[in-house]
Amino acid sequence: MQPSLMADDAGGLARGTCVQVYLLVDTRALDRPLDYLVPAGLAGTIGRGALVACPLGPRRVVGVVVGTDPATHAGRLVALSGRVDTPAVPAPLLDLAMWVARYYAAPVASCLRLVVPPGAEGALRRAADGGWRLVVPARGPAPRLIVRRAVDGPAGTARQQEILARVPGEAAIAAAELVRSAGTTMETLRRMASAGLVVLGSEAPVLEDIHGLGMPVPAAPEVLTPDQQTAGERIARALASGKPQAVLLHGVTGSGKTEVYLRALDVVRTQGRGAIVLVPEISLTPQLLSRLRARLGPGVEVWHSNMTPGERARADTRLRDGTADVVVGARSAVFAPVREVGLIVVDEEHDASYKQDSTPRYDARQVAFRRGRDAGALVVYGTATPRPETWHALERIQLHTRADGSQPPAVRVVDMRTQRPGPVSAPLARALRDAADRGHKAVLLLNRRGFALMSLCRACGWLATCPSCDVSLVHHRDPARLSCHHCGFERPVPTVCPRCGSSEVMRGGMGTQGLEQALTKIVPTMRLVRLDASSTAARGSVAELLAEFAQPGAAILLGTQMVAKGHDLPEVTVAAVLDADAGLRHPDFRAEERAFDLIVQTAGRAGRRGERSTVIVQAWEPGSRAIQLASQLAVETFLEGELERRRQYLMPPFGHLVRVVIEGHDAAAVIGLGRALAAAAADAAWPVTVLGPAPLHRVRGRTRRAVLVRADRVAEARAAALSGVAAVADEAASGDVRIVVDVDPQTT
């Protein structure tokens, strides 16, 4: 295929050695392999996986060689400008990226970006010798702008004093963090520096370290529990076989799954092979990182999407040259360049964070299975609350008891219809006061952030809503503002109704900030640590907050679902889920599964050292199936019932789903295209069921419709969905309508 708009350095060379290249560009028309001629001087040096400099009009862009077959284009070919002096993409990773593109119906370039070396997204540079180089980031951390208070500076205005109050006395704060926390701008900080109020400087931030998090790292147990011993032996046999396998390690919370992982990692390293450990969110599992580094040494590398370019370059080099042989990270770590992968661990495999919510919309759990199969590796999926799909499909290794021999605490369900108004029930208040008296700790989950969920007028019914999204604005504090969690729109908190002028503007609903304020009145002596998206925006803040919570003394860790993710902290004797049945109101077939998981996982934070503990679940519908079974910690009973329900409706794992979302500013065009797409998918040659188009709430001013395609096989559902997309693609492009295809969606 002849690339369009190609400038030929050699004036259109004759046919010769040819390669097929995917360009790392986002132009949909170029989402196909292009034939390029290999210059005579490079013959024999460019193979599959090599990065090359490709002419594209007046530019040179990076491409990845995906084949060396004869040219498919009958005309003259354009020559490559040269090879880029950087390591080639290893064949297993190149194959994996191409599979992701096929399975998830994603542009190939977006998938190749997951596996190319650092710098491939940047500019190309031509060296003095004529060769091509990537602008690879420095392997040390880039300097950051910091703010310090000026010594004996002027007082400043009232607003400037508010900003100064957020700058530590003699320490410094990152300028970006101060801008965020104070709700100010860089221009304001520069004016304050000119006035002598603050001093702006720069420093190199410390590379992310997984040591020194202020939390104890437990020593390796001398004796394993019988279940752990059996699990370790079964995993060792699987590793010794050298055959690709996948197993589910199902253990109750506190059963010692991490110790089983660690011993499996020891085994695979003695075989001279590498390993990947996936966690849902890297910042939420600092204790696991500490344990891995403490037990396995400096050969452990960290990998996640929030790393600086310098950190990524350093990790990439260490993994490619074998200096590091174990990588731990979030979903993108499944693509890390680990050599000779023998083991992949997917910890907390139930967590929806493993599904990418932007292109390419891959599921790291499924990609791990594929990479393990191709590498002849063992994939271990570990959790206390398995997904029905995993429970149904995989061989199980079970840890039935806690590692310390203690019993999980009993769970009490509180019917909030019988309680006085307020977020905290009487039983929970008593439990918190008792924990405060004993100097113990508590973990509270409320899966809504902000101070209040809405602002409304009692007099006329006005509700503060986002002008671009069909949602109410959430009231936040510090600084006070109404904010949209979808598009980021903000406005001041009104003191009078903008519609009728009444002063009867009230708040409704409660988020984590509102709960924090309520707790200061119930247990004023307990230290409060809030863990949600608002409090953890700064880099490293999660580890700092968890370390603060782990300090001796009575404390409460409160927040959204972050608080339930794998934390193993001592002296937690109270755990509670507030508004536990809120998720059951969502029109999603996974709603019960998510509510069940949150309750069981939160309950598992308490009594992990055998302490006498209390677990409370507050609900408005306490008799619902998910609430009742979660309170009994009846995981197997819930999963068997859930599988039966899904079998009845042919939902995963008994069917496969593809979700297509159509969105655009022209509501009529979106609605019409949604109907046309659904009709075309239903008329395709594959046996599928098509649901929709169903309305979704407007986001960023764009009307949205969703079409759900279900089939017995994923290939059939994907093919029918893509047939529908193809039928409306031209009209969608001309009307500025965006179409997103999501294979195996986590929300429906």
Image (cartoon, rainbow, N blue to C red):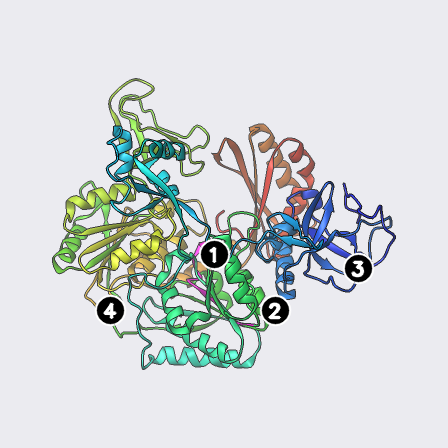
Q: Residue furthest top?
A: 500
Residue 41: numbered disc: 3
Provide the residue designation for mark 2: 374
Residue depth check, mark 2 versus mark 1: number of the one nearer the observer: 1
Question: Label 4 vs label 2: CA separation?
Answer: 40 Å
Amino acid on which the number 3 mark rests in the picture: Gly
Residue 365 shows in the view: no
Residue 140: numbered disc: 1
Counting the numbered discs, the total is 4
Q: Where 419 sits versus 322, above or below?
A: above
The numbered mark, 1 or 3, whose residue comes first in the sequence reads 3
Q: Residues within 10 Å of mark 4 (few under 14, many from 20)?
A: some
Provide the residue designation for mark 4: 609
Left or right side of 233 for 564: left
Residue appearing at x 62%, y 35% in the figure: 673
Give the residues drawn in magenta, as a range.
341-353
Amino acid on which the number 4 mark rests in the picture: Arg
Question: Label 1 vs label 3: CA separation?
Answer: 35 Å
Residue depth check, mark 4 versus mark 3: number of the one nearer the observer: 3
CB atoms of marks 1 and 3 within 8 Å: no
Secondary structure at badge 4 equals loop
Q: Residues within 10 Å of mark 3 (few under 14, many from 20)?
A: few
Question: Label 1 vs label 4: CA separation?
Answer: 40 Å
Question: Label 3 vs label 2: CA separation?
Answer: 35 Å
Q: Position of residue 73 (x, y in %)?
A: 83, 51
Residue depth check, mark 3 versus mark 2: number of the one nearer the observer: 3
